[in-house]
Amino acid sequence: MTGLTVVLLTLAAAVLVGVVLRWRSGVPREVGGDVERLTSGDIGAELGERATLVQFSSAFCQPCRATRRILAEVTEMVPGVAHVEIDAESRLDLVRSLNILRTPTVLILDASGRVAKRASGQPRKADVIGALGLVVGE
């Protein structure tokens, strides 16, 4: 009976961890600690007038394609916002310096290039628009 209890507790813990990770995936969060400031030279494109959505992707990442579509739609909806996609494999220096651990990861930069928000995983369009509203309104 003890073995069955251990298995059930392990299974319950794994399900709980999975649910929490799924719930947090793709939600833009505040960036703590030393806030990075990126330039157009860092990302290889011009910064947006009001904000910039920087997406780190990899070649075989299915959620990256959906994220690209979502961010392109948001960019069309919100004036002064640019979308830049960076191939994580070709920019390992930037990936390491920004502590990018998975793709897609989206950084929301303010007009000056300061990393204001960050989302790991595929974000929802409403979450991106809400985070942009906070960044542009600051």
Image (cartoon, helix red, strand yellow):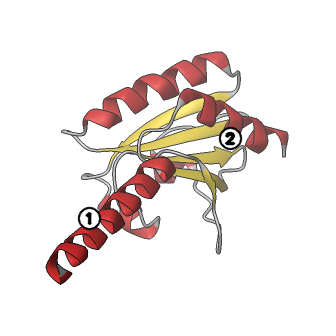
Vertical side of 33 occupied by 132: above or below: above
Q: Position of residue 130 (x, y in %)?
A: 70, 35
Lower position in the chain sequence, tag 1 or tag 2? 1
**Residue at 26% across, 34% down:** 62
Q: Please tell me whether mark 1 sits on a helix, a strand or a loop.
A: helix
The label shown at residue 11 is: 1
**Residue at 33% across, 36% down:** 64
Please identify the quarter of the rendering in which residue 95 is found.
bottom left
Label 1 Cα crowd, 10 Å radius (few <14 / some 14-19 / many 20+): few
Q: Residue extending furthest front?
A: 1
Is residue 120 in view from this perspective?
A: no
The label shown at residue 19 is: none
Is residue 114 in view from this perspective?
A: yes
Name the image quarter holding the N terminus: bottom left
Please identify the quarter of the rendering in which residue 67 is found.
top left
Residue for badge 2:
131
42 displayed left or right of 128: left
Q: Position of residue 94 (x, y in %)?
A: 40, 61
Q: Please tell me whether mark 2 sits on a helix, a strand or a loop.
A: helix
Vertical side of 66 occupied by 47: above or below: below
Q: Position of residue 89 (x, y in %)?
A: 24, 53
